[in-house]
């Protein structure tokens, strides 16, 4: 019948137009097709090193971090490592602007920048593929810098600098200054994590009071409120399972220093002394990297 035939033709035409329209409309890409995960950034320094991340107001560009000295630890000439994998490009502006600087372009289209370097892993104009933790230079004060520090930026794909960058899982908001301890390249030499902890080394009842990062480890001061004992132990973070030079010491006020030093696979110590209601000096070393408390810790 004519009326039925017309209706069938109309439905067919509508269906054709809908299919055509759908084909012409750009489809959103599947979340699993060609997507690249954003990198998780480590600190740009050696494992165990702690420096202050200063995201200060008025910085140019806004949101850049100035990595600076922390608790008297000088950042000058510190090794600078890639915070995430990518391709590094090396530049030199001489005595202007960023001076010697590196830009790493990451797989998701983001970039990181490292400026005012004293030296670089490649000459200006060079490039290299880097993994997270690859050494790219050393901290300096080249370009328009007034003191040794590392200028660091996390740049989005559209060129905007992230004003609240995150490293080591720590977000440094605009106007904040935070100490950040690096886990970058930890275990890269030894190939595994230390199976021991300061609490396991010192024994039951001990709680951490203070710590000091070292290149290749960390020195810890612990206290047992039940018996009044202090404990110092230096834990390795590199060369795990291989005997290397490590030490720990504890010195209650007015008493002789007691140390434990030698070639150890995992840690030095524990050095345990009773120091209830006493002040103590403490510290440790991994290889040539050492720490001695500049003041007495009083419990």
Image: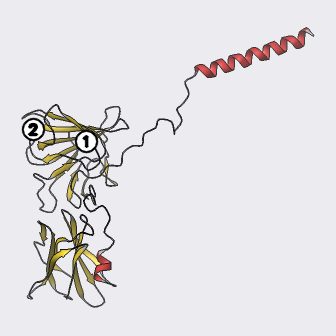
Measure the C-alpha gap from mark 2 to mark 1.
16 Å
Name the residue that disc number 1 marks.
153
Name the residue that disc number 2 marks.
144
Q: Is label 2 in a helix, a strand or a loop?
A: loop
Residue 284, given in percent of the width and then of the height, sits at 15, 73
The answer to whether residue 290 is above or below residue 119 is below
The answer to whether residue 85 is above or below residue 19 is below
Quadrant of residue 285 in the image?
bottom left
Mark 2 Cα shell of 10 Å, populated few (<14), some (14-19), many (≥20)? some
Mark 1 Cα shell of 10 Å, populated few (<14), some (14-19), many (≥20)? many
Quadrant of residue 239 in the image?
bottom left
Residue 257, given in percent of the width and then of the height, sits at 10, 84
Q: Nearer the viewer, residue 73 or 121?
A: 121
Residue 38, given in percent of the width and then of the height, sits at 39, 43
**Residue 83 shown left or right of residue 90 in the figure:** right
Which corner quadrant holds the N terminus? top right
């Amino acid at each position: 019948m004519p009326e039925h035939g017309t209706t069938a033709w109309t439905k067919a035409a509508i269906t054709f137009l809908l299919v055509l329209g759908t084909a012409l409309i750009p489809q959103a890409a599947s979340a699993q097709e060609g997507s690249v995960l954003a990198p998780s950034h480590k600190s740009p320094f050696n494992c165990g090193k702690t420096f202050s991340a200063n995201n200060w107001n008025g910085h140019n560009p806004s949101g850049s971090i100035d990595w600076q000295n922390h608790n008297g630890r000088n950042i000058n000439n510190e090794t600078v490592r890639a915070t995430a994998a990518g391709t590094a490009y090396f530049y030199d502006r001489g005595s202007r602007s960023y001076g010697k600087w590196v830009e790493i372009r990451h797989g998701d289209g983001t970039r990181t920048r490292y400026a005012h370097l004293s030296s670089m892993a490649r000459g200006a104009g060079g490039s290299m593929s880097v993994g997270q933790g690859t050494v790219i230079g050393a901290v300096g004060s080249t370009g328009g810098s007034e003191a040794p520090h590392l200028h660091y930026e996390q740049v989005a794909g559209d060129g905007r600098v992230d004003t609240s960058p995150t490293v080591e899982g720590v977000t440094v908001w605009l106007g904040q200054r935070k100490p950040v301890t690096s886990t970058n390249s930890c275990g890269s030499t030894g190939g595994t994590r230390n199976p021991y902890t300061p609490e396991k080394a010192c024994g039951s009842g001990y709680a951490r009071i203070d710590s000091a990062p070292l290149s290749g480890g960390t020195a810890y001061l612990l206290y047992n409120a039940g018996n009044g004992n202090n404990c110092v132990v230096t834990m390795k973070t590199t060369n795990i399972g291989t005997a290397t030079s490590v030490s720990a010491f504890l010195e209650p006020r007015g008493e002789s220093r007691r140390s434990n030093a030698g070639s150890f696979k995992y840690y030095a110590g524990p050095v345990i002394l009773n120091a209830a209601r006493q002040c103590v000096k403490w510290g440790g070393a991994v290889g040539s990297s050492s720490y001695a408390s500049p003041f007495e810790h009083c419990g």
